[in-house]
Image (cartoon, rainbow, N blue to C red):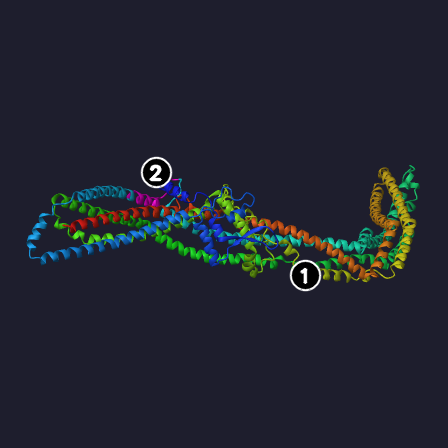
Amino acid sequence: MEGHHQQIISNYRAIINRISPSLTGGVLNFILEPANETDSEETTLRIATLELPKIASKAKEFFLTRSAPATILKTLYPTNGTDGLKNTAYMDQLITSVALLVASVIIVIVLLLYPFSSYRHKERKRRTQINKTENSSTNRTRRRRKESQKGNVPLSTKISYTVFAILGLAVITLQGLSCASLYYSIDGVVSLLQSDDAHGGSDKSSQPSGFPQLLSVVNSVINETRRFFDEVTKTAHEATKNAIHTMSDRLMAELKDRITDLKDIVLSKTHVRELTDLRRSLRPDLLNNEGDRIIAQIRGLNEHLIAFAINQTGLAKDIQNSLEKVCQQSAKNFSVCEMDIMNSLTINPEIQIKEAERLVDPLKKALNMPFVEMLRKFDGIMNDLNNAMSEITPEIKDRLDLNPILKPVSDVWDKVEKYGKTVNQELGGVKKIVNGVVPSAHAYFKIIAYIILVLLIALLVLVVYQFICCIVETLELIFAGHPSARMKALHSPFSWVSIVLSCAAALLPIIITVCIVIFFMATVISNEACRYVDNEEGVQIFDMSTNLLLKHEWRTFVSSEISRHQLTQYLNLSPPQFVLTALKKKCHNTDGSNVGLLPLVGINSLVNTSTVVNGSQINAAIKKNEESIVNKIISLKFDDYVSGDFQREYDQFFDALRDVQELDDNGTLQTLQELKRKEDEMNESLIEIRKSTEDFKEIDSAAAEGINIAVTLAQKNIITLEEYRQKATEALNELSVLWRNWSSPDIHDKLKNAFDNISNILSRKETMRIEVSEILDTQMDLLKRKMSVTIDEQSQLLVQNIIPCNRLYTITTSVLNVTCGQYGAITSVGIYVFVLGMDMLLLLLTILITRIFFSLHGHLYLNF
């Protein structure tokens, strides 16, 4: 059956292409019209106004004009007109349809009226003749004479009815062929509508058709639509949430950077940075700590010197007594016996203590100067400024929060989700109905179709039977000379055969008319709708038309449908472009990844960045923040950290500093150096004494042992003294470094300039307010630019993921295939009604011929 199906489809396509061989633009001209925008000379399209005169004029142009002007096509192709794009109207098809309809009506009138009028006229004539004959006195003789003349049929009559007999045989043959054609046509259409694929199930890769295709496509479209709404709402919610979250995070990070930069600039402008840098380089806390440590080290050293002198004196006496005892017993003269032990091993701590104590009081005085305390407070300015900024940041964060600003964007998907749930519920009900009705129709359609086929064949057989009976009786009249009594009922218009054929003759034009209307509609839809979604050139025209239409109508749609949701000020709602091309071609990704629909239709950004960044809410928040920041900075109390008489305090501190330096260089360090020399001398003396004890062991081992013990203890005392002395020396050296740093001419000049700048700031707070405002404006403008970049980036990422269109591709292609495809619904319906209409027309003509022959046969019967 594959070749038969293909032949049916090819014939049908040839017929509709013959009617309209190319794209016409007719429907576009009917529903669209050019519209010039007020602010531009460019021509766009708009929906045609629904006015009855315009509709009638366009309908007349569309259907009744053989070469209607392709207005819309000229709008789409203004340079080259409509080359290759004819605007063939449907006048020929409409004339043919009307002619067939009128012919059918005339045939019905003839079939219904002529047999009855002819029969009544002939019956009245026959009865009149019989009455006249019966009233005659020679009635019996005349009847016999008439009966004897019945077999005398004229030759012309015989020839005439012989021709009708031959014509009848031709009609019978034609009806036989019609039955076969009717059977194969309906069987092919039914098989096409019921097949599991386009070729009767032989090719597994082909698309399904008929009822299986309808059921498969409806279920597929419903399932894909439900999944689409679920995915869109889920993906859109998640993508929008992530985008807003990322925007907010980056905005807060950028805000933090701007506040940090603002703080740094304010610190530099107010010269607080200079003071804090000087404070860090001078390290007053370290100076104070080092001074306290030096005082503690000096006093600890002094205390240890006293204890050392006492312990060392006792050990020196023990060593001296032991040496005297050994030297008296020894005959040999040792060098240590002549050593002045007390002078070599002891010190007088009064001199060192006195020199060290000379440094303590001036150092305390210098460390307690108000200038040092003022320097120590410089960090307070920084802390206050940091606290002010830390208070400002949460305020700005709350005021610049994008979540309430972009919440309407997120609310859109809530509305889409609600709409999707409603649609899914409706689709669920439709799916149940389709799954219940289509299988039943699938099961009974073939039975019903063949019942109709059997009824048509039975009607055809009845016509042929009547025609054969008429031929047989005609032959009897011609050759036998008398009619058959069994055929008398056949001549009556009230016989069941006549009634059936009359009813069929009345019903067939109605069926033909319906077939004509349906075939006409299928042809119009196929030529004027399907070609704009199934043909490459037609898709281009469709997209160009919708582009121009949306360019004109988009503003109205946005203002009427979306503005009430307060979204127009935040969304970049540009009209989509080339929608059908995107759905049919670009949405299908062979690698399986999900492509976003919006970028494919020319929408690369969803959020109106300029409106968000420059909106009243953001500007109001920034304005309030600027006032708050300026007030907090201006309200910083520099007077609390900088003394009004800081120059005098500065001079006093450096005078005290010079005194400490002089004492340090000329007194304490020299005393410590002298103490180190004394330590070295004592160590050398103890080493020499220890060497002599080896010789003393032979003389007096007990005395020698006592000397060793005393020497060891004395060395330990010296080591401890060295530790105290080294700590004091290190502290003094570190202090000397600080002194040199503080006494540097460069530091002196910087301090003086910093204090002069601070004095200048304290005297011009209003000027400072203006400067801080300008700095803040610059930082906020930079924040806006960074915010714009971030919103643009996230908006582009959002539109790429917000509406995945793989399922839209499946839905679109499925719907187009089931409606406008080669084996789609429009083609199937067109084929079915075309075949059925042609067969009904043939049957109607057959009935017409038989009825005419029947009338002539009845006339022949009445003549005998």
Return the disc, 2 or 1, that comes first in the chain's sequence: 2
x and y, in percent, of residue 373 in the image: 83, 58
Q: Which mark is residue 110?
A: none
Taking the magenta stretch, the answer to whether it contains residue 201 is: yes
Instruction: Name the kind of residue labelled 2 in the image.
Output: Gly
Nearer the observer, 174 or 182: 174
Is residue 751 visible in this depiction of the protein?
yes
Which of discs 2 and 1 lies nearer the camera? The answer is: 2
Nearer the observer, 417 or 586: 586
- The residue to which callout 1 is attached is 620
Taking the magenta stretch, the answer to whether it contains residue 265 is: no
Q: Residues within 10 Å of mark 2 (few under 14, many from 20)?
A: few
Q: Which residues are magenta?
A: 183-204
Is residue 215 visible in this depiction of the protein?
no
Q: In this figure, what is the number of numbered marks?
A: 2
Instruction: Left or right? Give the position of 702 relative to 235.
Output: right
At 89% across and 52% down in the image, what residue appears? 356
- State the image quarter where residue 761 is shown: bottom right
Instruction: Name the kind of residue labelled 1 in the image.
Output: Ala
- State the image quarter where residue 255 is shown: bottom right
- The residue to which callout 2 is attached is 3
Q: Is residue 620 above or below residue 800?
A: below
The residues bearing labels 2 and 1 have C-alpha atoms spaced at a distance of: 76 Å
Q: Which image quarter is the N terminus in?
A: top left
Instruction: Left or right? Give the position of 131 relative to 228.
Output: left
Nearer the observer, 316 or 429: 429
x and y, in percent, of residue 438 in the image: 35, 51
x and y, in percent, of residue 31 in the image: 48, 53
x and y, in percent, of residue 625 in the image: 70, 60
Q: Secondary structure at mark 1?
A: helix
